[in-house]
Image: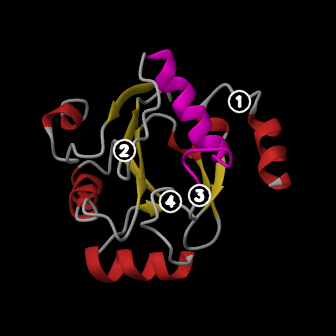
Amino acid sequence: MLRLALLSLLFSATVSIYDFKVPSLEGGSIDFSKYKGKKVLIVNTASKCGLTPQYIELQALHEQYKDKLVVIGFPANNFNQENGTNSEINEFCKKNYGVTFTMAEKVSVKGDDIHPLFKYLTDEAAKMGVEDPIKWNFTKFLLDEKGKLIAVIPSKVKPSDESLTKWLK
């Protein structure tokens, strides 16, 4: 809890998505500053959700638009549907859905222990008039090439839906 409080303090001065670095599911770090000039799709994921098959379409987006889009999954157990360890999540995603897009370590995307990145994203969504955007797993945050949030796509909207792909064409 203290670590999250310190992270929140550290990122309270964050002015851009490019200021964030988060642990990767496979080890190492995901440095968002490397994604300048590309669109970024951030998705809170879960392995035991009715929407889990969206991994297939997220992988397809990753493959089809890899030159201009970075897909990053963030496993989260906020809705009690992702109780595995980081290692178990990684194995599940690769084995069942062939996931090769970037995955972060499991985080909290809501509540008192919200990860600073998701606090930033929900604050940016609020500026767009989207209050409390994360109502379930597989909420999608689309950022443009300059790191600005341009769309919040609800959970039930599939990654292949026109409301998302129109931004990629």
The residue beneath circle 1 is: 14
- Which of the numbered marks, if any, corresponds to residue 158? none
The residue beneath circle 4 is: 76
State the image quarter where residue 161 is shown: top left
Q: Which residue shows up at 55% across the image and 69% down it?
A: 25
**Label 2 to label 4, Cα distance in Å?**
11 Å
**Label 3 to label 1, Cα distance in Å?**
19 Å
Q: Which residue shows up at 50% across the image and 62% down it?
A: 77
The answer to whether residue 132 is left or right of residue 23 is: left
Mark 3–mark 4 CB contact (< 8 Å): yes
- How packed mark 1 is, by other alpha carbons closer than 10 Å (few <14, some 14-19, many 20 or more), is some
The residue beneath circle 2 is: 139
Label 2, secondary structure: give it: loop
Q: Amino acid at mark 2?
A: Thr
Q: Nearer the viewer, residue 165 or 75?
A: 75
Residue 6 percent across, percent down from the top left? 84, 45
Q: Amino acid at mark 1?
A: Thr
- How packed mark 2 is, by other alpha carbons closer than 10 Å (few <14, some 14-19, many 20 or more), is many
Q: Nearer the viewer, residue 73 or 53?
A: 53
Give the magenta range: 107-128
Quarter of the picture holding the C terminus: top left
Residue 93 percent across, percent down from the top left? 36, 74
Label 4, secondary structure: give it: loop
Q: In the rendered structure, does residue 63 fall within the stretch colored magenta?
A: no
